[in-house]
Each structure stands twice: as structure tokens, then as C-alpha cells.
């Protein structure tokens, strides 16, 4: 803390920092503000330069005040009082709409800054006085049509006068220099407000495809004109040189139900005027309600980024794809530069008892989602993306750093919409200053119905422990962890299999690859060095195939279906296009495997027994088969057919004993290029080839 300052650290306590505390001990301290005077009592001193002073009544938070102690005068600022229950009770305002609210005749501005002694609106090179409510919201209205006009707030706080952007900004000037007033009606593409999202009702019906906007559109081989832009994902029927579909039309043809977009909101580390000079995944958030400017074709027009983001979402919807946004409500890029910290220092972030900032996220700050005005901001932002952009779900980065009450509030909010909103996130238990019982971690799934979790137990069991480069799992380790497979293919929710991870299958997001860490193909270069390339591709097919055939929600990383590589880079968040781009020439080379994945997706969508929505149905319909270990097999009992799935994770051929005699049609095998009407087995005995995944169907009756 600064020297020679008095901080309000509790409702009746000041902490004074000065070099000469010893010389003041026999003096009586007094607090003076707005003609008021309040005498204090010295409580304790520490190390001769810090003193704690108690007062008989609440201190004047948000007012200019001075502590007079002997001949010394100390400015008084709000300190850790902002993290007390008293502060929450007195200054929480969850009902007032914050931000700039445009109409043709005037725009209303409101910003929450209860500890500021004064706030002015700075707009068109003029200052406009703002009035403060009892809850600390500052208001003003400015007449005229202010569409596309930049603005900031000038805030007097903690002895400084600073300019701050609006955390509720809907758009910004290039590189986030200033907030901008927006007439949102001017940003809607034709028919946007009346167009419908794809028909979708149950979480278990989702098949998620994770996509980075720039990765998907930047490769010249993809034939996309608006490369690296929102608009690139509105272009239909783009093709490679050999006429293979790319971009939006390729994703549609693949057959997934949802695209999950890495962050589209305004983020740091990319110069929006020269975006080709840097690369970023988007997990360095700056402004949460404004789309990223580097994805717009014109960053100088603040409406363009909004309109083009909406055009992209509408194009996905028109092609039968729902849209999930990856959102980062656990941290900001740099705490000290954030409008949250500038407007209400010390409130929006978590701190340890000694005053040091929390860092469970690993980036230097943790957003305090459990505080009411932080929660309000998150809920307001979620509602804004649902209402204004018509998105269909949210993926919460480091969701385990968020609190259960906030996640439940988001779920309740989303349930009010007349479309199904998916919520999923990373339920990792992080070392953030939040009680473990409050964290939205995977082991709390019973507290969070309607919220799904990335299943790292599934991931690590199939391909090996993530943080041990050469560790292997079932698919790449010749059947290792086979004892976990019954639970994994059952949606990780059955009580009778042990190691239950979630309450219902729709809460398990099953995956073996995502944007983080090595791609599955790059992982296999480390874990299966002695296998041939063809064998590695078979192993890859086993892992991806299991993902698509397990109960729960399957999740694919873009390009996984063509053995995507990042050239061994396991943390490519700023590594550039050469490493991160979707290589559309590789898509040309791997048509057979793409067809295999498409066929698996079609099987999952055609047969409801792969998409059961409760553990009782799973227990009744899914049965583990006796197979020669380490071959794993299970039977699904449909209403009119039985479906058997077998996986051989070894180099050996094994005998296969089917659940019952009869005709078993081969729906798919990664050893058969195309399955025809002559692909069937008669009887109850067959064989399974090395590294083979096979799905068989027997009609009943």
C-alpha cells in the first residue's frame, strides 16, 4: 500500500500508512468530510508505520474525506471495505440497467462507481456532470443522435482523476481506445430478429465442434475471401482446388449440431489495425459485450464488428448449426488496466487475507464472481448475447474458478428463453480464494443441473494423463484403463460402475482433443513412436470413435477428423497461423477418415440409444459384453434393434463373440472403406482386427 494514506478497510476502521506513526500516538485522530467531524480511537500499530483506527459509526465511503491526526493530514480512500458484507448490503444495485442506452433523441448513461467522489461523462470533447444514486450508480442523459460517438467516464477516485471506458461497452474504437454509443437496430442483418435457431431440445443430442474464427478461414487453400474474419464464416460453398468443401459448408456437411467458437468478444494482444502481425486464441479478455475488432472487415466503423458477428451467427443458424460462445468470466487480461479495477478498485477481484491478489487462473487475477455486482455483470452479459446476438449456449473457461450461485443464476436465466441454451465449462478445482464448497467444479454436478462439464477423466483414460507427455490410455496404450470404460461409455453417471463423475449423462462432455494442449495426433507422436503412421491413424479413430459413441455430449476439435497437427506445439495461444490454421489441403488428403467420422455422427443421430438422458435408462439399455481383454464391447438395447460396439486397442486379431446368434449388420468399421448391404455376420462368432472399431446391428422380431 501507499505511504501517507488512510484506507477504509472496514465500515468503522481506517488503516493508516505513514513513516511517523510513533510521533502521533499521543494525538487524537479525527475524520473530516463535508463539514462533518468524527473522532477515532487508535486500535493498534504495526511495524511503526501502520496504524488501525476505530470509529463509532460508519465511515463515508465514496466521499472526499481527510484524516487529521496531530499535524498530519491523510487523504482517505476506500480499501478492503469494498469486500465486506456491509459494502454489498449498502451498494449492491442489481436492478439498474448499466451502460449507454441509445435512442434517436437522447442516450442515457449509467455506471456503477460507489467509491468514486465524482464521475463525469466525456463525449464529443465535452464534459457532462453525472448524478450519484445512494447505491453508487452515476447517471446522465445527453440529447441528440449519438450513434457511433465515442465516450469515456472521467472518474475521481483514490486521489486521482482518470478516464475509463465503459465495462458495458457494446462496441469500441480500434484497439479498445474508447467506448462507443451504438444504435443496435442499425447492426441487424436482414431478417435477423425474426430468424430461428435450429430445432434442438436435449443436451444429449448435441455434437459440438470447437472452432476458432481465424483458424477456420485464414488458409488461402480454403478458398475463403474474408480470411480471418467473421464474414469468412458466412461464405457458402467455398472449396479447395480439388473442389472439396471448406468453411461453413464443410462444417454443415460434417453433421455436428453445434459450433463452439473460441472467444469472439474484444481481447488483447492483437493489433486490430494490423491483425496479421499477431495471433491470439482470445483468452485475454478486455471487453465482454463488444465483438473483437480484428475479426471485422472495417475496424474503424464501430457498427461493422457487431453486424458481421450477427451475420456469422445467422449463417450458422441458416445452415442448421447452433452457436455456443466460449466466454471468459474468470479473469481479465491485466487487472490494473481493466475498467473494473479502475472504477471500483479492489471489488471485482479476489484477494487473499494478506491483500495479495488471487491467481487461481494463472494469469495474475481472478474475477470475484460471487460478489453481487460481478454476478450482475455476468448475468447482464449472458442475457445480452442471448437477446442481441441470439446465440444458443456458452462454454465457461475455467468454470471451476466461478461460484455455484452464479452458475445456477445463469442456468435459471437461460431457462426463461423459448429455445434450449447449452451451458458447459471447465470444472477444474483451481487454487483461488473461494471456499471449495462454492466452486462450480465437476464434483458439484449435483448442485448444477443443466450445466455440463468437460470430462478430463474421460480424456485421460482414453489417451493418457494430460500432463505426462508419454503417458497412454485405453486407445493408445493397448487397452490400459479398460476397467474405466464401462463408466465412460455410460456417460460417467452410473452408481454401479464406480468413479461416477456427474449426476446425469448430459453433464459429461466427452473429448480427447480441444484447442488446449497437444492435438490427439501430436500426442500420438509421443506416446506411440514405434507404431506406423497407419497404425497411429487407427488408434486416432478408436479414440474419436469412442467419443462419438459414448453416452453424454461428444466434443470434437476442428480438424480432429483429419488428424489435425499443430507441429508438436502444445500451447499455441499466440503461435501464429502457420501452427494454428485449419489446413484445408490436409482436409483434401484425409477424405476417407472424414467420411468415417461423418458416418459415426450419422449413426449417433440415427439411433436414440446412443443419446440416453438418464442413468436409469442407461442401466437398463447399456450392457457390458464379455470380450477377450483388452477388447472392449458393449450392447445397446434399442426399441427395435440391438447395437453392439467393439473396440480392439491392440495389434492382435481377436475372436469376437456376439451377444446372440442371428444376422448382425455391420454399420461401420474403421477397417472397411464403405459398408454395404453385404456387410453382415451370420451367427454369434466373428473376429476383430487390430486397432479396429466396429458397430453391429441386429434387428429384433
Image (tube, grey):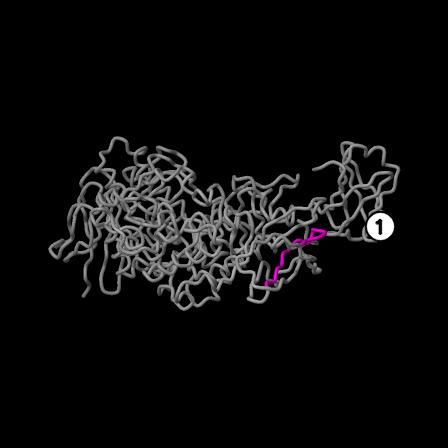
Q: Is residue 186 left or right of residue 229?
A: right
Q: Residue furthest front?
A: 125
Q: Decide: is 312 above or below 25.
A: below
Q: Is residue 138 left or right of residue 505?
A: right
- Residue 604: x percent and y percent? 28, 57
Report the residue at 42% width, 56% height from top.
309
Residue located beneath label 1 in the image? 38
- Do we see residue 405 in this rendering? no
Q: Residues within 10 Å of mark 1 (few under 14, many from 20)?
A: some
> Residue 423 or 483: which is nearer the viewer?
423
Element at badge 1?
A: strand
Overall secondary structure of the magenta section: strand
- Do we see residue 651 in this rendering? yes
- Residue 659: x percent and y percent? 21, 54
Magenta stretch: includes residue 455: no
- Residue 231: x percent and y percent? 37, 53
Magenta stretch: includes residue 112: yes
Report the residue at 83% width, 38% height from top.
72
- Which residues, given as a range, are shown in magenta? 107-120
- Residue 571: x percent and y percent? 41, 37
> Residue 151 or 41: which is nearer the viewer?
151
Q: Decide: is 8 above or below 170.
A: above
Amino acid at each position: 500500500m501507499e505511504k501517507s494514506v488512510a484506507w477504509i478497510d472496514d465500515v468503522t476502521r481506517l488503516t493508516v500508512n505513514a513513516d511517523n506513526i510513533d510521533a502521533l500516538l499521543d494525538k487524537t485522530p479525527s475524520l473530516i468530510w463535508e463539514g462533518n467531524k468524527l473522532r477515532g480511537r487508535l486500535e493498534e500499530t504495526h511495524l511503526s508505520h501502520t496504524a488501525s483506527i476505530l470509529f463509532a459509526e460508519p465511515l463515508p465511503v465514496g466521499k472526499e474525506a481527510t484524516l487529521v491526526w496531530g499535524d498530519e493530514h491523510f487523504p482517505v480512500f476506500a480499501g478492503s471495505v469494498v469486500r465486506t458484507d456491509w459494502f454489498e448490503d449498502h451498494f449492491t444495485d442489481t436492478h439498474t440497467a448499466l451502460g449507454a442506452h441509445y435512442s434517436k433523441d437522447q442516450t442515457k448513461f449509467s455506471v456503477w462507481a460507489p467509491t468514486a467522489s465524482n464521475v463525469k461523462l466525456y463525449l464529443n470533447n465535452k464534459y457532462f456532470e453525472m448524478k450519484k444514486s445512494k447505491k453508487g450508480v452515476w447517471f446522465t442523459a445527453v440529447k441528440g443522435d449519438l450513434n457511433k460517438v465515442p465516450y469515456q467516464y472521467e472518474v475521481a477516485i483514490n486521489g486521482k482523476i482518470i478516464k475509463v471506458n465503459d465495462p458495458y461497452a457494446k462496441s469500441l474504437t480500434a484497439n479498445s481506445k474508447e467506448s462507443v454509443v451504438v444504435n443496435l437496430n442499425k447492426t441487424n442483418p436482414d431478417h435477423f430478429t425474426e430468424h430461428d435457431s435450429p430445432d434442438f431440445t436435449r443436451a444429449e443430442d448435441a455434437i459440438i465442434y470447437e472452432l476458432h474464427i481465424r483458424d477456420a478461414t485464414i488458409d488461402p487453400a480454403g478458398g475463403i475471401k474474408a480470411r480471418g474474419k467473421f464474414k469468412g464464416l458466412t461464405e457458402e460453398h467455398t472449396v479447395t482446388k480439388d473442389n472439396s468443401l471448406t468453411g461453413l459448408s464443410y462444417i454443415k456437411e460434417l453433421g455436428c449440431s453445434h459450433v463452439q467458437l473460441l472467444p469472439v468478444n474484444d481481447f488483447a494482444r492483437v493489433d486490430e489495425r494490423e491483425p496479421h502481425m499477431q495471433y491470439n486464441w482470445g483468452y485475454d479478455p478486455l471487453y465482454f459485450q463488444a465483438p473483437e475488432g480484428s475479426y471485422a472487415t472495417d475496424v474503424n466503423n464501430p457498427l461493422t464488428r457487431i453486424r458481421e458477428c450477427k451475420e456469422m451467427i445467422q449463417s450458422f443458424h441458416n445452415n442448421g448449426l447452433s452457436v455456443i460462445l466460449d466466454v471468459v468470466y474468470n479473469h481479465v487480461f491485466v487487472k490494473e488496466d481493466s475498467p473494473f479495477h479502475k472504477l471500483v478498485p479492489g471489488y471485482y477481484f479476489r484477494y487473499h487475507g494478506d491483500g495479495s491478489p488471487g491467481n487461481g487462473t494463472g494469469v495474475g487475477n481472478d474475477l470475484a464472481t460471487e460478489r453481487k455486482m460481478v454476478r450482475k455483470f455476468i448475468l447482464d452479459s449472458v442475457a445480452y448475447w442471448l437477446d442481441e446476438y441470439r446465440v444458443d449456449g456458452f462454454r465457461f473457461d475455467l468454470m471451476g474458478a466461478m461460484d455455484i450461485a452464479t452458475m445456477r443464476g445463469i442456468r435459471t436465466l437461460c431457462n426463461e428463453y423459448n429455445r434450449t441454451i447449452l451451458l458447459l465449462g471447465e470444472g477444474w478445482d483451481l487454487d483461488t480464494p473461494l471456499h471449495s464448497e462454492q466452486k462450480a467444479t465437476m464434483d458439484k454436478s449435483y448442485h448444477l443441473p443443466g450445466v455440463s462439464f468437460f470430462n478430463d477423466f474421460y480424456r485421460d483414460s482414453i489417451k493418457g494423463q494430460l500432463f505426462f507427455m508419454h503417458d497412454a490410455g485405453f486407445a493408445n496404450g493397448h487397452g490400459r484403463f479398460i476397467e474405466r470404460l464401462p463408466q465412460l461409455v455410460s456417460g460417467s453417471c452410473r452408481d454401479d460402475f464406480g468413479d461416477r463423475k456427474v449426476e446425469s449423462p448430459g453433464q459429461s462432455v466427452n473429448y480427447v482433443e480441444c484447442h488446449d494442449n497437444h492435438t490427439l495426433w501430436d500426442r500420438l507422436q509421443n506416446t506411440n513412436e514405434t507404431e506406423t503412421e497407419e497404425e497411429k491413424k487407427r488408434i486416432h479413430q478408436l479414440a474419436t470413435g469412442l467419443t462419438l459413441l459414448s453416452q453424454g455430449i461428444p466434443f470434437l476439435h476442428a480438424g480432429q477428423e483429419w488428424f489435425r497437427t499443430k507441429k508438436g506445439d502444445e500451447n499455441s495461444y499466440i503461435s501464429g497461423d502457420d501452427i494454428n490454421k485449419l489446413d484445408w489441403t490436409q482436409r483434401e488428403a484425409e477424405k476417407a477418415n472424414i467420411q468415417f467420422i461423418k458416418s459415426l455422427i450419422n449413426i449417433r443421430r440415427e439411433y436414440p440409444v446412443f443419446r440416453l438422458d438418464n442413468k436409469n435408462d442407461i442401466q437398463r439399455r447399456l450392457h457390458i459384453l464379455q470380450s477377450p481383454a483388452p477388447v472392449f464391447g458393449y450392447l445397446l438395447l434399442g426399441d427395435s434393434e440391438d447395437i453392439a460396439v467393439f473396440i480392439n486397442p491392440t495389434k492382435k486379431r481377436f475372436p469376437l463373440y456376439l451377444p446372440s446368434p442371428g444376422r448382425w449388420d455391420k454399420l461401420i468399421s474403421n477397417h472397411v472403406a464403405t459398408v454395404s448391404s453385404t456387410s453382415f455376420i451370420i451367427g454369434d462368432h466373428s473376429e476383430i482386427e487390430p486397432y479396429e472399431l466396429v458397430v453391429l446391428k441386429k434387428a429384433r422380431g
